[in-house]
Image (cartoon, rainbow, N blue to C red):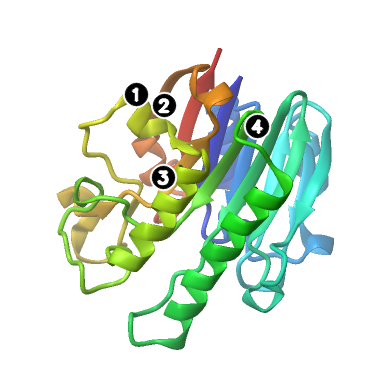
Amino acid sequence: MRVATWNVNGLRSRFDFVLHWLRERQPDLVGLQETKVEDQKFPRMELEAEGYQILAHGQKGWNGVAILAREPQTLVHEGLPGQKDMGARLLAARVKDLTFATVYCPNGKSVEHDDYARKLAWFDSLRELLAADHRPEDPLVVGGDFNVCPTPLDTWREDPANIFHTKEERERIAALHQWGLGDTFRHLHPETQAFSWWDYRGGSFHRNQGLRIDFLLATPPVLERVESIYVDREYRKKKDGLTASDHAPIIMELR
């Protein structure tokens, strides 16, 4: 099974690019983030024509998550309990024996901004949802844009005073690990520096000045099935004149 996560930074504006990627990579299960489209305007028919069943949880022009699956999927969660004010940021479904969640975690803006405290609270709510409704013994993948660099290895420039790098944010990722979610990339590549996001400005991509903030986290029954995982850097580049998202997809193969 080929599982992927991708912050597309606007599905409608990048739809042809996403189709290009789907046809080239042929994933079986995909979590999308930052779709920025209301559910009634989601391009459901076009994606169904590519062989996918669709679940979407969106809003106008902001946030939004979706799951594309080649197998039938059953809704498990739509939205994060207690965090409705933070927008459409979580969607989970059951696909065969696997529970798959796609998350778009808040950015936080800056450590001085009110949204930083809201970001930390959002992570606390995610941890509470896991504890209340899931078990580490069951097959579960939580993929998405977490907007945190878990360690200095995951950033081109360590900066503990700024968002993505702070002690408090890293403690929230550590809490997910402590509950039972492992980082599938680090599981296979413990010492590799690889990034998933690069700023559009300043030639950041070509200078490889990026951050690893997009993950596929998984419980032990899934970790033992991981054959490979990589950052799909080729789809951070333009394709046939189409502009990429500032995030690259993450692709994982499960045996």
How far is disc 4 from disc 2 in space, using C-alphas?
14 Å
Image marks 1 and 3: residues in contact by CB distance under 8 Å: no
- Give residue 69's quadrant in the image: top right
> Taking the image as drawn, is residue 247 in sight?
no
Amino acid type at mark 1: Leu
Question: Looking at the image, which is closer to me, 35 or 134?
Answer: 134
Question: Which residue does the image show at 45% across and 44% down from the upper left?
Answer: 178
Give the mark nearer the N terminus: 2 vs 1.
1
How far is disc 1 from disc 3 in space, using C-alphas?
19 Å
Which corner quadrant holds the N terminus? top right
How far is disc 2 from disc 1 in space, using C-alphas?
8 Å
**Local crowd size for mark 2, using a 10 Å CA cut-off: few (<14), some (14–19), many (≥20):** many
**Judging from the image, what secondary structure is the residue with disc 2 in?**
strand
Horizontal and vertical percent for residue 133? 73, 47
**Judging from the image, what secondary structure is the residue with disc 1 in?**
helix
**Judging from the image, what secondary structure is the residue with disc 3 in?**
loop
**Local crowd size for mark 4, using a 10 Å CA cut-off: few (<14), some (14–19), many (≥20):** many
Amino acid type at mark 3: Ala
* Residue 29 disc label: 4
Give the mark nearer the N terminus: 2 vs 3.
2
* Residue 229 disc label: 2
How far is disc 2 from disc 3 in space, using C-alphas?
13 Å
Amino acid type at mark 2: Ile
